[in-house]
Amino acid sequence: MDAKSILLVGMPDSGKSNYIGRVWGALGEDNSSLFATEIPEDIIYIENLYGHLMGGQFAGRTDRGDYETPHQVTFKVAKKGEDNVSPTEILVPDVNGELWKKAVQTYELPEKWMDKLQGASSAMLFIGIMSKENKFPMDWVSARSLLSIHDPKNIDIEAIPTQVALCELLRFIEFGMGQPIDGELPKVAIMVTAWDRLDAKTSTNGPMAYLKQEFPLFHGKILGSGNLNIKTFGVSLVGGDLEVDKDFKEKFLEGQIEGTGYVCIENEKGGAERVHLTEPIAWLISEDG
Amino acid sequence: MMEKVCNQPECTVAQTGTCLLDNSIEECPHYDNENVTGENVPFVEEEVEGEVTSAVQPALPSPIENPKFPHSFSLDPVEVNEITSKRYCRLIGILGLPDAGKTAFLASLYLLLSDNKLENFDFRDSQSIMAFEEISKGARQWSEHNPPSQMTSHTELVDERSAGFLHLRLYDKLNKENVDFLLPDLPGEWTTTLIDENRSERLEFLKSADFIWIMLDGRSFKDNSTKNAAFHKTKLLIQRLSKMLSPNCPHICLVMTWLDKGAPSDNVIEKLQALGPQNGVSLSIESIASFSEDNDVFPGSGVENLLRSSLTMINIQTPEFWNDTAADADRAFLSFRSVENS
């Protein structure tokens, strides 16, 4: 069987674990092009994540003392309608965002994780819309006054703008995975999560337009990445904001989680359309571009 | 328990109880009861029935070395060579006295790109993005002052003698192509010593520059009490450069900063412009306001113009053949000129 590993990359609170939890349930849904061919042996972790979502809650920041020990989630999936093709095993090490935050600050990655990066078939890079962790470049007035202070000790190393961190993470992915596999460029899915937090107009312009507006450096780097095959996806796990929108949460709990959520992609006509939550994974593991 | 150490770094009294100089411990002038910081091995002395025994404290376990990604601070010549061996880069030398505004210019350019504020240039990449980030926060004063003692753990040893480089790849919307710029990180002092002492050995790589920007503090040309001295220094600098870089001196652009305090007068422009033909160099003048205290002049004014006019001039000039004998091992990037355009 073909084993493919997808590495999850992203700063804290960017939506990695919640996506994995949601997609586990989504594999069984009607509109999914993929289905799970068997139930993994160790499902406690993944069921826990999915369970949170069913209860109307996003799982909190993955709270582990030892964030360097990978928690492996394994799916075996096949495409619906393809009977004689053997399933693809997908290994998704669930990684704490602190690991990547530290990598951006220090350029270091524990050996276990560097091995996983270099052995990965593809990667997913997460950004959370309006995450409280997101940081933006300073305004001109502050920049000017910082320049005149000349005091390096005033500098807050913590405050690296999110778009710079994203550029670095993409650079790390390129460094680790950069070699073409069988002549194909390695694939990276950019997952812009909490897509439902956007207003309708911004939403209909699709994820790249959103990135260009909010994170221009990162948007530019995506366009300039010659060594990776990159696609961007706007992701809404359940179709609304469980944390902030009480009405939505009530309605959600009255109904069922199956069928909720979607992924937003640009179409050829320049607009955006909605596809199933499992589409990013389907794209990552497919042979074609 | 007492911790005793010997001031002599090679003394093995800690391990063997025997003084290197064969002195008794009590009498040796180098041996004292106070902790001495440094490379001495601290040890514990115990007296057991009149004998002195000593044991060495266990050494601290060495920290685990994690694998590392390549850094994204300013690049050394070897790292630059990695880039130039793959694609054609426009090398722009940026000179200027301390406080002429080099740092502010770079910070301004970076902030403009960060906010998608250039009309016809889009960001595509920087292999030295953290250097830009630091410069924009005033953490790096473009080597004007001593490098901050507090930097992150991967600070490489700063070689006083070689310049660090910033890298920037932009998409040029007018010409519909990517452009790579290399901007060397030159301390203002190097310009000073070039003018005052004609010290130019660290500036040899300017011979391979496609373009040179000389940042001039625009305010000094507005103030009557300072403008003559400012002009004089500029004249000397151009003379030095012309002598050092001829017969293939790159085009020089005098970049007058602090545009928000007022544009230079026509008279000043005329006099500065004349320095070109007087010294046999091709010369132009631009004005910028990296930041602005004037509501009518937006921050970053002139920055895009400067990029555009420089790029246009670089593109139309025919590259001269460079004599490679000046290149040595760690400046191998100078041979980038032989790489075809990407």
Image (cartoon, helix red, strand yellow):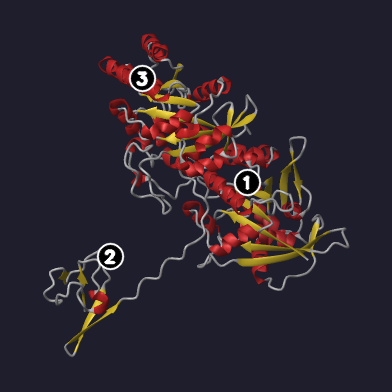
Q: Position of residue B257 (x, y in %)?
A: 39, 23
Q: CA distance from mark 1 to mark 3?
A: 60 Å
**Where is residue A233 drawn, in percent x and y?**
69, 47
Residue B246: x, y in percent? Answer: 43, 22
Q: CA distance from mark 2 to mark 3?
A: 52 Å
Few, some or many C-alpha atoms within 10 Å of disc 3 (few <14, some 14-19, many ≥20)? some
B34 or B331: nearer the eye?
Answer: B331
Q: Residues within 10 Å of mark 1 (few under 14, many from 20)?
A: some
Determine the chain carrying the residue at label 1: A
Q: Badges 1 and 3: C-beta atoms under 8 Å apart?
A: no
| SS for dot 3 | helix
User: As displayed, is residue A12 above or below residue B80?
Assistant: below
Is residue B218 among what the camera can see? Answer: no
Task: Please report, as a chain letter, where disc 2 is located.
Answer: B
Report the amino acid beneath label 1: Arg
Residue B221 is left or right of residue B69, and the answer is: left
| Quarter-of-image position of residue B54 | bottom left
In this view, A164 is above or below B14: above
Quarter of the image for the C terminus of chain B: give it: top right
Marks 2, 1: nearer the viewer: 2
Q: Is residue B149 visible?
A: yes
Q: Which residue is mark 2?
A: B39
| Three-letter amino acid code at the position of disc 3 | Gln
Q: In this view of the protein, which residue sits in the foreground, A103 or B234?
A: B234
Image position, residue B259 (x, y; %)? 40, 21
The residue tagged 3 is B239
Q: Which residue is outermost to the left? A: B27
The residue where tag 1 is placed is A197
Q: Is residue B225 above or below residue A249?
A: above
Of tags 1 and 3, the one toward the viewer is: 3
Asked if the residue at tag 1 contacts the one at tag 2, i.e. Cβ–Cβ closer than 8 Å, the answer is no
